[in-house]
Image (cartoon, coloured by chain):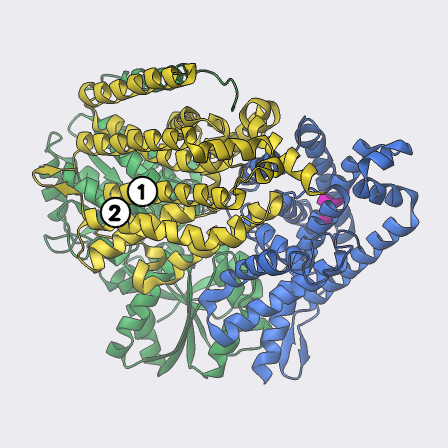
Amino acid sequence: MLSSKPRPLSRILAVTAVICLFLAGSAFNAAAEKVYKIGGIFAVTGPASFLGDPEKKSMEMAVEQINQNGGIDGHKLEAVIYDTEGDPSKAVMSVSKLINKDKVLAIIGPSRTPTTLAVIPMIQRAKLPLISCAAGNKIVEPMKPWVFKTAQSDILAVASIYQHMNKQGYKALGIITVGNAFGESGKEQLLAQAPEYGLQVVRSETFGGKDSDMTAQLTKIRKEAPDAIVCWGTNPGPAVVAKNLEQLDIEIPLYQSHGVASPKFIELAGNAAEDILLPTGKILVADLLPESDPQKEVLTEYINAYENHYNGSVSGFGGYAYDAMHLLAKALDGTGGDRDQIRQNIENIKGHVGVSGVFNFSKSDHNGLNPDAFVMVRIQNGTWELVK
Amino acid sequence: MTNRATWFRIAYTAMAGIVILTGILVSNAYHLQLLTFIGINTLLALGLNMLMGYAGQISLGHAAFYGIGAYTTAILTVHYGISPWMALPAAILIAMAVAYIVGVPTLKLSGYYLGMGTLGFGMIVHILFREWSSVTGGASGFIGIPPLELGPISFTSGRNYFYLVWALVLLSIIICQRIIDSRIGRGLRAIHDGEKAAKAVGVNTSALKLQVFVLSAALSALAGFLYAHLVYFISPGTFDFITSIRMVTMVVIGGMASIWGALLGASLLTLLPEWLHSFSEFEMVVYGLVLMTVMIFLPQGLTRGLMDLYERSKKSQT
Amino acid sequence: MQEILQYLFSGITSGAIYAVIAVGFSMLYNSTELINFAHGEFVMLGALSMVTLSGPLGLPLIPAFLVSVIGVACLGMLFERLAIRTVRHPNPIVLIIITVGASIFLKGVGMLVWGKNAHTIPPFTDHPPLDIAGAKLLFQSIWIVVIVLLMAAGLHLFYKKSLTGKAMEACAISQKAAWLVGIPSKFMTLLAFGLSTGMGAVAGVIIAPITMSSYDMGTMLGLKGFCAAMLGGLGSLWGSLIGGLLLGVLEALGVGLVSSGLKDAIAFLLLLFILYVRPGGIISSANVERF
């Protein structure tokens, strides 16, 4: 007979004790009336940490800035940030915690599209404003009253690339995309918008995020002799693609997505990065912008503040959370913490100059950006050059 | 009546009572949701516990059945408009069928090879979820899964879903205990005490192992169904290798060959990340350390049954 | 035709990577009948150590190589001493879970030490890719194949010619008999772990110029390396080489001729196939455990 184990009853008591301790522990809620609590959920660790880590830091920095300037209507801000690890289940638990335990007024994040989609039903039910930092278009299309986003959408990125291709007179293109939500969304847009610009996708391939060799896929693409190749992914895959193209002696021009708009890409791709084109938020070329550019001042401020605060190099990704926090601060003004009022205020924001672009929200547009948020750049001599 | 049976009855009644009370007393939606997740994880641990603890088989790919349950109900309810209550038996039956087909060749393996075989199976199913995007939505996930409703009762509120999940957990516990007390259970115990001897007295060991494998798949699929209609969104990342390892961890830490061990393991593994959230950078390090430490110092108590089984079967095979 | 040749060469590049990882798996299994699920993480440690040593710390190639490999091998032996030897009743399930726990632990350590980004180092020699009939073969892949062959040959000599090697093989064949003639089996296991993780580190170092090294590179590489080892025949060194190259080529052909989404599935489908049909792998023979 399966032998004497601790009696089942004692196990149940153990479990109950564990659960009770937990519930008791979390019942301690510091009474903080004069503070506006803002929740943040980002993929601080895990495969999307290159997004979540700068986002968390930028949000904390923004909160500090706002508090130093006296807060909002005399209320200080408090950021309550949880790590989703890029996992939808954790994101759902974190949102539940923020809403029911921390009782936040609004939430910034998540970093990724799948995690955002996972938390949307709960946000809508709880009637709480959410400003996501994820790129996916599905987040705001169809429009949901409580959901906003600051990251530029893939639609705009693809449009930038295709506009440039039109100028060059390209007709046929091959695409190679990474096998995750970001890559899939990019592929969807690339295929959907091609006819609008008179372009034809002659070959579509995919690769895994951790793959080290894409020469097979690129050979297949080369066979179709396209005028250009578009690679859609986030580091390190696209760097491998760039290197592979160089190894295979393929002369076809390469476009990348804004997913690699960071110095890390140039570091990884080395010489193979030369002459690559991509759309990016203006942050990458802030120093190249003319003084007349509306974003120049905000960008320089953000870059300096971030680099002084944290010893890391700045990227556009952190900017999404930074913009979200400042937008939220604007919307909080005069509401006294009324969530519906906050939501309406966000919708009414016009001409907010942010890191990611100039935001103009409306009832129907919860992303607020237009193609000006992107500029095309080319990598020359290891740095970014603006393309006219 | 044996002592064990009486103890079980007491424990079970206590458990049911605690569940009912908790549902009434706890009103914070976050706590209710956490407890609901514990319930879903308990179903996962329960099935795997029957397989690893009582039948002595390891599975490193069990998240596949969890995913099959979730995706089946998602596809049927969203693409085909079928009622979730009809999708539930479908999800369970499909998981059981897949378990049967995969189990026949895989359970013939043993030791490391069984582990690798189940791992390979789990990876293939995960890749299927990710690549078959026309049906599953691919890596971007599957949105719009409908909430559950039964007549006037809607299961969207935290409390109702809590009761639903735990009612099913209690039901599953009874079923598992019945099996353990039945002829099948005696057969399993015979295998556990000595597989060759069991075969010699006419116990159909391969059939029994297969039956437990299929049962564990059914429970995992049930958990998948409940997850899908709780979060309304699923993606392949929830059903990957890491999840399979988490399931194994729940069983191992809670105690193999013990129904209540499944409950303990599920609770600990759901609550620990919540307690440690301020140390999220160290989560992996702590998790790995805990796994190693438990297995090095406590395996005798936890896996004694498993070890005996292996030792006996190894001796009798050479 | 030129495409097929290119697929072949791409396959050789990835295949060489799988082969060099598979060798470590096989070698350990051969000496101890253990499978180290954390092997991929030792590869990762080797790669990232190399990145730090030859990058920011500026060590030249050979010293960096040696320091990385020896450092990781020591870590491997520490792991054996602390986590494997202390287990009182070793059996596959317990050991599987311990090594899985170790892989998660090492991944976490890797993330804390090297951060979440990817890193790369330049190839050993600055040679452009070889052009053969219009298809390109990465020069670094040739380095990898050469090093795998050297390792295999070296191990072969070790097992056949040196006393320690013969002792290790004796332990693997029968622990009791080895003990009877005075062979310290505990030390042999320690040594085997050191050798195996050291080889994992070598794998990491030589693939670092090709792959993008990051804290989580070990998981997939370890799994595929294991598939390659099984494909060739677990425990057989030459089998690892063949299995690795075969897996790489089949993956590349699968991507090239069928679909790129299929790539990962190929390794695991082959694994299941081998397990069900021919568990001894390609080099399956009566003496499947020895080489």
Q: Chain of mark 2?
A: B
Q: Mark 1 sits on what residue?
A: B222
Q: Residue C167: horizontal and vertical position, in percent?
A: 87, 41
Q: Amino acid at mark 1?
A: Leu
Residue at 70% across, 41% down: C72
Q: Chain of mark 1?
A: B
Residue at 65% across, 34% down: B312
Residue range (magenta) = C195-199
Q: Amino acid at mark 2?
A: Leu
Q: In this structure image, what is the colour of chain C?
A: blue
Specify whether C124 is left or right of B96. Answer: right
Q: Residue C242: horizontal and vertical position, in percent?
A: 70, 64
Specify whether A259 is left or right of A119. Answer: right
Secondary structure at badge 2 equals helix
Q: Is residue B284 above or below residue A368?
A: above
In front here: A234 or B57?
A: B57
Q: In this structure image, what is the colour of chain B?
A: yellow
Chain in green on the image = A
Q: Is residue A112 visible?
A: no
Res. B88 mark: 2
